[in-house]
Structure formats: C-alpha cells, structure tokens
C-alpha cells in the first residue's frame, strides 16, 4: 500500500468542567485538553487508538497545519498505509495537562486569580494524565481502545493505562520506555531542572508577570537532555571531533566559544527549544517522569504484582543503543508480564540512533509495529489473525 500523509489537520479543544482529582491530593476544577484525530471512528467505536506523547511533543501526531511546515512528530508512523494505518484506525493524540501546546497548563489563566497559573499549577503525574485521557475516550463514546501506544514518556502512559483501566484497552504498545526511571535518569532531570530554576529570569516560576523567559536555563536543560537521547556512535558519526572556527591564517582559534560541531548542534537545539517550550511545563513533565513507579505503588517494588491485573496484550519495543531507557528495562517489564502469563510480543531492535530511534523510520522497527497493527485490524474485522 502506498504511504501518504493524513494531510492538513487542525486541533480540537475539549473543555471539561468535572473536577479532576490529582495524585497530589489537589483538584483541578476545570480544564481544557487539546487533541487531534485522524481516520474515522467505526460504528461500535472499536477501532480507536490513543497516542501518548513524550516530553516535548504534543497532540500534533501526524499531518501538517495549513500554511506551515509543522509536520506531526510521529508522521512517519501514523497515516494512510503507514504502520498505524488511518484507513483502518481512528487515532487520537492528546496534549497532556500541564503542557504548553493548548491544554491547560502553567501559562494558562487561573480563573480564580485572572493571572497565569505559573508556579501554582498543580503537580501532575502520569496517572493523572491517563485519567484525563479517559475522559477524552468518554467524549467520543469509546469504551475500549483497540490500542494505547506511546514512546518514551508516552510508553509510561500506555503502561499506566493497562494498569489503571485494564478493561478499557485491548493492546498496550510500549516503545523505548521503562517501568520506572533509574537513579541516573532522575539525576539528569534534576540537573536540567536546576538549570531552569537558577536562571535569574525564572522568578520562582512567575516569569510571565515580568515579561521574560528563562531561556538560558531552558537551553541548558535541553542540551543536557539531548545528549542522553543520542548514542555515542550516532554522535561520533554525525559530528566526530570536527572543529569549525579558524582564524584568517587557517589556524584554529582557542577559547570557550563554539569550537566543535557537536557544541554547535547542542546550542542550536537548546536555543530552539527555549523559543517554544514553557519552563514551568518542563519542570512539571520531568517531575512526572521521576514519580512514575507502578511497582512501588502496586506491591512494594514487585513489578509483577503491579501488572497482575492487566488484561491487554502487549507489544514492547526497545533499541540496543538506547542508554537512557536501555533494553534491560523493557525486558524487566516483559518478564513481569510473562510471570503473570500475559500475552507479550517483544522486539529488541539493533538501531544506532539511541533513544531517538523510536521517532525515526527504521525498517525493522516499523515492520514490527505494522505487523502488530495488521493483526489488530484483522481481529476487528473478524478475519483470522
């Protein structure tokens, strides 16, 4: 089948007036969620697939916005004839609470004060996001998703769906993810947060009132994160030790400005990120990453007890060079599921791109996902899988 884009898309904004009780004990009285949908929901609402996004992504999963080049972050995965085929499935992307791309978050106006929420926005968790997403499903009359799918932080949400709402998804697809951050990962997040919090323009999270943005801190935070998304081999191939600045006599300059190509790349990524992402959102989302730990919540560190009641079939994918969420963490999840005799498909993909591989068009990886969704589609139509 020929692959094509879902075409021009636009966001939908859903307003919810029913209060949402949060893991922190706080309550969000009302909120808005930005979403996008692709494909057509069938008569019994059985072909719906929820896509959960990672840290700096959003509801804009596929297609393009009119008059822009802003292509969805997983456009290579979602669309007609693509691994997640929108000719067969109705796909929903939801922007998480606390984000800065249309859903209610720190930059939104607090109706009680008439000012941006800022640092007073409630702390949110993966579990809170899942409960909010369940209300999106209710809005569309979806009693059970054909699949909930996500990579990285999105994979945590997919796993949490299987645990929190076991009767509401048939398949759980967890890609380049983990059932809980390692101490090293939490440490990376903390260093990145400190870069933001210690920026003089942060103003305790209320920088909106000062008309400034803690861009330096955000930029450094993004640089720290980006280093962890790429493998050492990928960095070596892209940048090596190439230097860029030479004086007129052809000799290299010496100093502390950008000298190496990899430095130039990281600074570019950091500066770009600081121009579109909200600092308070960054703090919220990285903290949600840290807090996710279903094994501790459901059975004193025993992951097999945490997943004992799940009913979904699982596809779990890891990448050999992903040192942020390495394959052994995916295997840990697979083993816990198998211990409970759950149905699991596991693929460990030999790809050179590190954690970012889940966003790229690796043929083996895409073939695995395509085959899994083709099986789901066959089951929906009553064909033999």
Image (cartoon, helix red, strand yellow):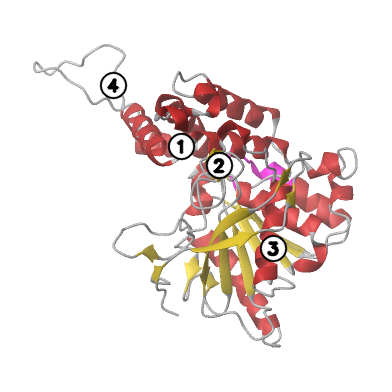
Residue sitting nearer the eye, 155 or 36: 36
Q: Earlier in the sequence, mark 3 or mark 1?
A: 3
Q: Is residue 351 visible from the viewing direction of this image? A: no
Q: Which of marks 1 and 4 is nearer the N terminus?
A: 1
Q: Which of marks 2 and 4 is nearer the N terminus?
A: 4
Is 259 within the magenta?
Answer: no
The residue beneath circle 4 is 259
Is there CB contact under 8 Å for labels 3 and 1? no
Front: mark 1 or 4: 4
How busy is the neighbourhood of tag 2: few (under 14 within 10 Å), some, or many (20 plus)? many
Is there CB contact under 8 Å for labels 1 and 2? yes
Q: Helix or strand or loop: what does disc 4 sit on?
A: loop
Q: Which of marks 3 and 2 is nearer the N terminus?
A: 3
How busy is the neighbourhood of tag 4: few (under 14 within 10 Å), some, or many (20 plus)? some
The residue beneath circle 2 is 321
Question: Quarter of the image holding residue 368?
Answer: bottom right
Task: Identify the residue shown where x is 43% and y is 66%.
Answer: 10
Query: What mark, if any, has residue 233 been given in the picture?
Result: 1
Span of residues in magenta: 318-331
Position above or below: 139 against 214: below
Q: Is residue 108 visible from the viewing direction of this image? A: yes
Residue sitting nearer the eye, 43 or 18: 18
Question: Label 3 to label 1, Cα distance in Å?
Answer: 43 Å
Task: Identify the residue shown where x is 68% and y is 42%.
Answer: 124
Task: Identify the residue shown where x is 74% and y is 70%.
Answer: 170
Residue sitting nearer the eye, 206 or 299: 206
Residue sitting nearer the eye, 385 or 206: 206
Position above or below: 3 against 239: below
Residue closest to the far left: 248
- Report the quarter where the N terminus lies: bottom left
């Amino acid at each position: 089948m020929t692959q094509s884009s879902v075409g021009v898309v636009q966001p939908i904004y859903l307003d919810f007036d029913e209060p949402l009780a949060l893991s922190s004990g706080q309550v969000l009285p009302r909120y808005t969620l930005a979403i996008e949908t692709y494909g057509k929901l069938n008569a019994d609402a059985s072909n719906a697939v929820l896509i959960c996004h990672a840290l700096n992504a959003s509801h804009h999963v596929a297609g393009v916005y009119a008059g822009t080049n802003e292509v969805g972050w997983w456009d290579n995965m979602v669309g007609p004839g693509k691994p997640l085929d929108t000719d067969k499935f109705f796909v929903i992307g939801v922007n998480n609470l606390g984000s800065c791309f249309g859903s209610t978050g720190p930059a939104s106006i607090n109706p009680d004060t008439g000012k941006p929420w800022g640092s007073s926005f409630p702390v949110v968790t993966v579990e809170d996001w899942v409960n909010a997403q369940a209300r999106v499903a209710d809005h569309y009359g979806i009693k059970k998703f054909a699949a909930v799918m996500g990579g990285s932080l999105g994979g945590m949400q997919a796993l949490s769906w299987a645990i929190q709402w076991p009767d509401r998804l048939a398949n759980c697809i967890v890609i380049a993810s983990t059932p809980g951050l390692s101490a090293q990962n939490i440490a990376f997040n903390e260093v990145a947060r400190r870069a933001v919090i210690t920026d003089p323009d942060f103003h305790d999270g209320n920088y909106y009132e000062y008309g400034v943005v803690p861009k330096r801190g955000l930029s450094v935070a993004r640089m720290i994160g980006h280093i962890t998304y790429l493998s050492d081999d990928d960095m070596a191939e892209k940048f090596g030790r190439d230097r860029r600045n030479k004086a007129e006599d052809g000799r290299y300059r010496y100093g502390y400005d950008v000298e190496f190509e990899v430095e130039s790349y990281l600074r570019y990524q950091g500066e770009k990120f600081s121009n579109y992402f909200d600092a308070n959102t960054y703090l919220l989302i990285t903290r949600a990453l840290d807090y996710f730990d279903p094994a501790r919540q459901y059975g004193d560190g025993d992951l097999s007890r945490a997943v004992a009641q799940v009913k979904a079939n699982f596809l779990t994918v890891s990448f050999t060079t992903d040192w942020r969420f390495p394959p052994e963490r995916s295997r840990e999840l697979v083993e816990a599921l198998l211990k409970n005799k759950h149905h699991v498909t596991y693929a460990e993909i030999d790809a050179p791109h590190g954690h970012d591989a889940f966003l790229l068009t690796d043929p083996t990886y895409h073939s695995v996902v395509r085959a899994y969704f083709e099986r789901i589609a066959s089951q929906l139509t009553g064909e033999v899988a």
